[in-house]
Amino acid sequence: MTYGATSARVRFGDRTALDDVTVRLAPGSVTAVVGGDGAGKTTLMRALVREVALDAGTVDTPDKAGLGYLPASSGSWAALTVTQNVDFAAGIFGLAGEPLAARRDELLAAAGLTAAAGRLASQLSGGMRRKLGFCMAMVHRPSLLVLDEPSTGVDPVSRIDLWRLISEAAAGGAAVVMSTTYLDEAERAGHLLVLDGGRALLQGTYDEVRAGFVGTITRDPSAVRPEWSWRRGRERREYWPASDQPADRTVVDPDLEDLVVALSLAATNRDGAAA
Amino acid sequence: MTTTLLRASSVSRRFGDVVAVDDVSMHVQAGEVVGLLGANGAGKTTLIRMLLGLLGTSAGTVEVLGGPPDRTRRRRLGYVPQNLGLYRDLTLDENLTFVAGAYGAAKPSVPAELRPYTEVLVGDLPLGAARRVAFVAALCHAPEVLLLDEPTSGVDALSRTRLWDTIRDRSEAGVGVLVTTHYMQEAEQCDRLLLMSNGALVAEGSERDIIADTTAIAVHTDDWARTFAALNAAGAPVVLDGRAVRVADGDPGRLERILATQGIAARLEPVPATIEERMLVLARADPDAAA
C-alpha cells in the first residue's frame, strides 16, 4: 500500500507552512524531502505522523503501530543509556522479553552501537546519537519510516552508516521519507521532493526532474545578470529560463544542485517581481 | 608575494594518552580558501583551537599573522563557530552592537535581506538568517583571517551560495579563510583541501588529489533490494544509490562471488569515490579511529 499526502495545507496563524503539497511514498523506496530552514520539511514530516493537523487535504499513513518517526530534535533521552532508550521505545509498542532483546541486539549491531550500549545518550557523538534515534524509530518494524534531517551535523563516516540503515529499512519493504538539506543525499534517495516556502518546487526521480527542467544554465567567470546567478567555486552559474543566453556563455549539463538553485532563484525573482 | 597568514609547523596535541593532533603542518595564505575535512574525532576542532590560540600545543609551533597567537593578533581573526556564537536572547541589532563594541569597531550595517529581522531575537531567527548574522558579526572588525566551522550546515542550496558569495568576497579582498566541512558541495567551493584522519594530515590538494585512486563500486541491478540485502548481510559498507547500490570499500571479486552464490544478476563498475567514502576507507584502515 502506498502512503503519502494529497493537497496538504498547514497554516500556523497567518503563515502557510505547507501549501498544496502532494507526495506518494511507495513501499521499498526512499523519498528525500529537500529544502532549507522554513521550507516546510518539518511540517510535512509532522503532518505525516499526525503531530500537526491539516487545514486542507489528506494524509494517508498507517496507524501508530505502523509508523516510525525520528524527530529533528535528538529523538532520544539524554539521561538514559543506549539500551534504556531502545527498550523504552520498544515498550511503547509492547515489545518485551526475548523478542525485545533479540531486536535490540540486531539494531545496535547494525548501527555500530553495540560497544556503546551502556553509555548515556548525552555522552554519544552527534552521529551516534542520530543512529540511536534511528534504531528507536525502527524498533517495531514500521511500514512507514519518517526521518526528519537524520544526517544534519552527522560526520561523514557515520553518514554512510546511517545511509546503510536507511537502505536496509527500504530493502526490507518499508516506505521511507527523510528530509535533508543536502542534494547529494537526495540524488541517492531516488525520489525527490524539493520544498520552497511550503510549496513543492520539484518532484520525481532525478531523471524526471532533469527532463522537466526548462531553460539553460551557464558557467563563466562572471555573470551577465547577477540576480540570476550564483557562485560555484571561482565561477558563477547563471540561469536562462528562456534559453536566450548570449553566444559567449558556456552551457553546462546541470546537476541537482544547479537545478534546485536555479528554480529557487526563479521562484524568488518571481515573488520579488510580484511584490 | 603571497603572505602566509596561518601556519602550523609539526604541531601535536595530547590529552593524557590520547593524541588528538599528530605532527600536523599546514598553512593558509592571503586570498586563499582552504577546506579542512575529517570525521568526528579526526582532530579538526583541536587544530582550530590551537590556531586560534585557545589551546596550547604539546609539540610544534603555531603562527598567526607572523607570530604567536597572542591577544593582539587574535583581534585580527574572525571566527564563526558551528553554534554561531551569538546571544540567542538578544535581538539581531543588540548582538551586532555588542560584538562591534567588544572589538572597538564601528557597528556594521545590516544587509538588506536581514533588515526585517533587526528587532527579532536571534533565537527566533530562521537558521539561514542566523548564519548570515554570525557572518556580519564575525566580519565587523575587518579580520585578516577567517575561521569558519561548518558555515552552511542546515541551510538551503540558494542561501548556501549566498554565504559563499560573502566568503569569496572576503578572500578576493585578501583575507585567508579556513573552513571545516564534510560535504562535497562545500569542498568544491574551496581552493585547496586538507584531510585529517585520526589526528594526522593524510591528504592535501584538490578534491581529486584527496580522493586519489580510491574507488567505490557501483552495482547495477534490476533488484536493488535483494542485491543490497545480500551485500549488507556479508558486512559490506553498502548503500542505496538511486536505483542501484553502491559499496564504499571492498574487493569487487569478493562482491561478485557473494552475488553469484545468491543467483543475483548484477554488473559491478568501479567509480571514483566520494569524499565521505574516502574517509570511510581511512577510518576502516585504522580501527582505533572507527570507534
Image (spheres, coloured by chain):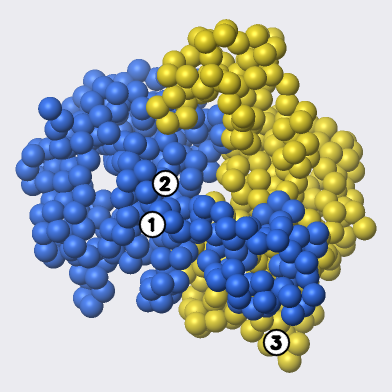
Chain colours: A yellow, B blue
- Mark found first going from the N terminus, 1 or 2: 1
Residue with the most extreme left position: B67
Query: What residue would you read off at disc 2?
Result: B208
Determine if residue B95 is in view.
no
Q: State left or right for residue B192 relative to residue A61.
A: left
Please, what is the three-letter code of the amino acid marked with disc 3?
Answer: Ala
Quick one: SS at disc 1? loop
Neighbour tally class for label 1: few under 14, some 14-19, many 20 plus, Cα within 10 Å: many
Q: Position of residue B68 (x, y in %)?
A: 8, 47
Q: Chain of mark 2?
A: B
Q: CA distance from mark 1 to mark 3?
A: 34 Å
Q: What residue is shown with label 1?
A: B38
Tell me, yes or no, whether dots 1 and 2 are on the same chain: yes
Check chain identity for marks 1 and 3: say if they share one: no
Q: Position of residue B80 (x, y in %)?
A: 34, 40
Residue at horizontal 21%, vertical 58%? B24
Crowd band around label 3 with a 10 angstrom C-alpha radius: few (<14), some (14–19), many (20+): few
- Residue visible at 79% across and 80% down in the picture: A94
User: Mark 2 is on which residue type?
Assistant: Arg
CA–CA distance in space, label 1 to label 2:
16 Å
Q: Are marks 2 and 3 on the same chain?
A: no
Q: Secondary structure at mark 3?
A: helix
Residue B247 drawn at (x, y percent): 60, 64
Q: Chain of mark 3?
A: A
Is B162 displayed left or right of A146 in the figure? left
Q: Secondary structure at mark 2?
A: helix
Q: Observer-nearest residue: B289 or A24?
A: B289
Mark 1 residue type: Gly
